[in-house]
Image (tube, rainbow, N blue to C red):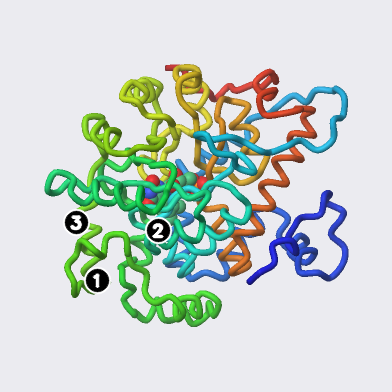
Amino acid sequence: MHDRTAMKPAPMGWGVSGSSREAQLRRRFPTIEDLRKAAERRVPSLGYETVAGGAGQNLAVKRNADALDAITMVPRIGEDRGPVSTDVELFGRHYAAPIGVAPMGLQSVFWPGAERLLARAAQRARIPYTAGTVSGVALEELAAIAPDVTWFQLYRLAKDDHKVGFDLVRRAQDAGIHVLVVTVDTPGRAKRPGELRNGLTLPFRPTFRTIRQAAVSPGWLSALMRTGQPSFPCLAPYCGPNASKADVAWYAQREVSGAITFEEMKRYRDLWKGPMVIKGVMHPADAEKAVAIGLDGIQVSNHGGRQLEAAPAVIDVLPAIAEAVGNKATILIDGGIRSGLDVVRTIALGAKAALAGRAFLYGVGAIGSDGADYVTDMLVEEIGVAMRQLGAPNFAALRDFTIPHPGAVQF
Ligand SMILES: Cc1cc2nc3c(=O)[nH]c(=O)nc-3n(C[C@H](O)[C@H](O)[C@H](O)COP(=O)(O)O)c2cc1C
């Protein structure tokens, strides 16, 4: 198994001489953008575009990142207290940094078996990892890989009065999962040209195009040979004893539908004993409704720009949502996080922690099996660097900084 200490980043940018693997990686991939570019070359376009793209012309994907880039922060001069602790408490548990892995279905299309790599990296780094209803690895296996940090994300499975949805929640509880995340921003299927252009089907259909792409991506192909065709194992038990992967994919397409309503969420609230988060909130009034039915966390998210192309950037709705419910619920955010500085920006504007999706996968696509560890270490290191540059002694102090935010949405 890969030795995590060997990946520990050197404290400063110039500490990258030498020929260790770590030093080489730091020279080749100093930023997430470097990893993205390499991943684009190494991963078949079917997988790359499925993950990198969003709804329509990717405008909301771009808007999330551009709006974060636009946030400036005025540094303060004070005593130098040395390195800043990145520890954070979320829902009564301690994590090493306010950054976590967002749920991503279809990530096995990008890199077969990626879920296991991301879960392992999160457990090593002690940051939250979110397994999903449509993950390519069963929630029980992911909870065993990352027992201290796994959360579970639920989609709406309403048939037979939520029989399957309730069963998934029970399974998550039995697997020792700490936090339930209910996604509400998928009222219907979005039009994603990247998936259409590449003719995405599950299981993969061996067209000339897919075979040609796989042939020039040997790392991806050998990962596929090891793990087999992507599937949705969380849902397999509900598809009958002899269901093929194609049957399970068809079941997922048919039965995972619509956004869980507040009335339905209340029933899940009554069932789930631990902390519960609503994911996909973009309006303060919706955040208030969620708090009123007893939810513990609000995850500000526009699904990484994959649902409503006209959605505002997540950072631009964050301050109003934090203002409305920040003293009653834990505010999380995801969408467009590409650096530790981005994480610090979100905390300064009202979040307790941020989650990222694509950034972790780009690490795997560029580097392979230890790519998620590399990204984790990079983001944690960058959070500390940004805090010290700002002169912020801790995360709470970030709220006192001057942060111009002309893009903030006024409700
Ligand atoms: C390939 C892919 C699959 C996703 N699948 C899910 C999912 O199954 N459930 C969910 O709640 N969100 C899903 N999301 C949204 C992410 O949880 C998260 O909101 C988004 O990726 C954050 O944006 P970022 O990728 O720019 O960090 C998915 C995102 C991507 C890129």
* Res. 57 in view: no
For marks 3 and 2 on the same chain, the one whose residue lies earlier in the sequence:
2
Mark 1 residue element? helix
Q: Which residue lies at the image location 38% right of the left edge and 47% below the top edge?
A: 153
* Viewer-closest of 339 and 9: 9
Question: Residue 212: where, in percent of width, then height?
Answer: 44, 81
* Viewer-closest of 325 and 73: 325
Quarter containing the N terminus: bottom right
Disc 2 to disc 1: CB gap under 8 Å:
no
Q: Tell me the tag on residue 194.
A: 2
Would you say 333 lies left or right of 210 here?
right
Real-space Cα distance between discs 3 and 2? 21 Å
Determine whether 230 is above or below 254 in the image. below
Q: The disc labelled 3 sits on which kind of residue?
A: Arg
Q: Which residue lies at the image location 73% right of the left edge and 55% below the top edge?
A: 30
Is label 2's Cβ within 8 Å of ligand 1?
Answer: no
Question: Residue 390: where, in percent of width, then height?
Answer: 77, 29
Tell us which disc is closer to us: 3 or 2: 3
**To which residue does mark 1 refer?**
246
Is label 1's Cβ within 8 Å of ligand 1?
Answer: no
Is label 3's Cβ within 8 Å of ligand 1?
Answer: no
Q: The disc labelled 1 sits on which kind of residue?
A: Ala
Mark 2 residue element? helix
Disc 3 to disc 2: CB gap under 8 Å:
no
Would you say 26 lies left or right of 156 here?
right
Determine whether 258 is above or below 262 in the image. below
